[in-house]
Image (cartoon, helix red, strand yellow):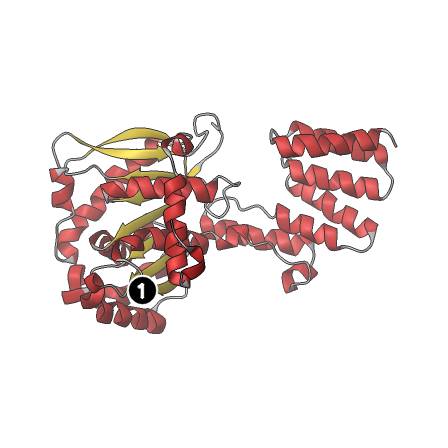
Amino acid sequence: MINMLKQTPTQYLWALLLLLLLVFSPQSIAQQTLDTLKVTSKSYQGSADFLVTLPNKYAENTDKKYIVLIDFHPASQPYLAGLHHWMSHNGGWPWLETIIVTAPDGHPGLGKLKTFTNAEQGQAFLSYVEDDLLAAIDKKYRTNGFKILSGFTGNATLGLFTLIQRPKLFNAYIVASPILSENYLSVMKDTPNLVPALSKLAQPRMLFLSRADSDFEQKQIADFDKLVTTLKQQAPSNLLWKSKVFEGSYYMSQPALATIYAIEQIFNDVHTVIEPDSTIGKAGPEAIYTYFQQVSNKYGFDVSAVDSLLALAKSKTKLEDALLVYQFAVEKYPQNAHTHHGLALGFAAVDEMPQAIAELQLALTMTKHPFYLHHWGKLLEEYQTK
């Protein structure tokens, strides 16, 4: 039995992670579907069978497109699937629903591609990722263009190598405890090349870089810290990066910890609600909408301004002003149930009940969520009796 009362903050975090992983029973993860992606390539004979974890209701939501995360360690699938299930089941917050792709175990052709010592030799691996693996994923699955590369130790170094050499392949990189000593894969030497490489890209790239201070990482600490210093001094403005040191934590815990923190960083802008009293909020609904259009351009997929617009409407002291914001939200997001619910509240507040009833009825047709069906249904009954 774990005694939570006597745990240090770091120990408490490990205990919590342990409990989370324990509750990821086969039944709870069964909502995700496992699939096999056969990737053929001129680089090896036959095909490599990648394991694909599809999000809950992937087959049902035929009009939805998804983010992709790739990890080249075959043992990463269970913890990635478990963490994703937990961190996305509450409306994709904080982890937007994602297709997780993990590599086969012991494939000789893929293993040979991943074995190189310098940038020139590594181009074959990068071409495989771009022309064979990513192309196969996009062909078979409904992807939205946003891709994450995740890795631990040697695979983490592969992530840094890919970011430096061919940053266009992925939008975000999760790099946990990379091997950097002896200028492995020339990462330490070539990091300054990020400036010209990223300058050609329209969208920014994201990087989460982490390590611990365990015995297994002692030989990497000096180079890791030097890399962080280099990034502080020379990283281009369109590299959105963050580094973290998990002091006192176990080596094998690093990829799970890095994933949790990285996902929060990567999708922070998606989930952040603009406060009504902020500079953007004070500028009005059009400014909020424009801001989220810019955020959408950053990610390459649509990021909704609905929550921020509804927050702005609720903050208005004049009922007429609130109604105008609700109407603006419906105009921009006519297929969103919450904008119509908001507009119903706005009409009801100014005692325009026929319009309020019509909007609430429309909102109910746009949701299958039992919570909203129940509460909005009761609200509709109240409106109809007035």
232 or 153: nearer the eye? 153
Query: Of all residues shown, which one is farthest toward the top?
Result: 60
In this rendering, the answer to whether 284 lies above or below 50 is below
In this rendering, the answer to whether 37 lies above or below 326 is above
Residue type indicated by callout 1:
Gly
User: In the figure, residue 68 lies in which quadrant?
Assistant: top left
Do we see residue 172 in this rendering? no
Q: Is residue 309 left or right of residue 163?
A: right
285 or 353: nearer the eye? 353
Q: Is residue 136 left or right of residue 240?
A: left
Q: Is residue 295 left or right of residue 152?
A: right
Residue 217, image x, y percentages: 22, 63
User: In the figure, residue 224 lies in which quadrant?
Assistant: bottom left
Check disc 1 and report its element: helix, strand or loop. loop
Residue 216, image x, y percentages: 20, 61
- Which quadrant is home to the C terminus? top right
Residue at 68% in and 31% down = 374
Residue at 54% in and 51% down = 271
In this rendering, the answer to whether 351 lies above or below 297 is above
Crowd band around label 1 with a 10 angstrom C-alpha radius: few (<14), some (14–19), many (20+): few
Residue 2, image x, y percentages: 39, 52
Do we see residue 37 in this rendering? yes
Residue 288, image x, y percentages: 63, 54
195 or 35: nearer the eye? 35
201 or 90: nearer the eye? 90
What number of labels is visible? 1
Query: Which residue is label 1 attached to?
Result: 248
Residue at 36% in and 58% down = 207
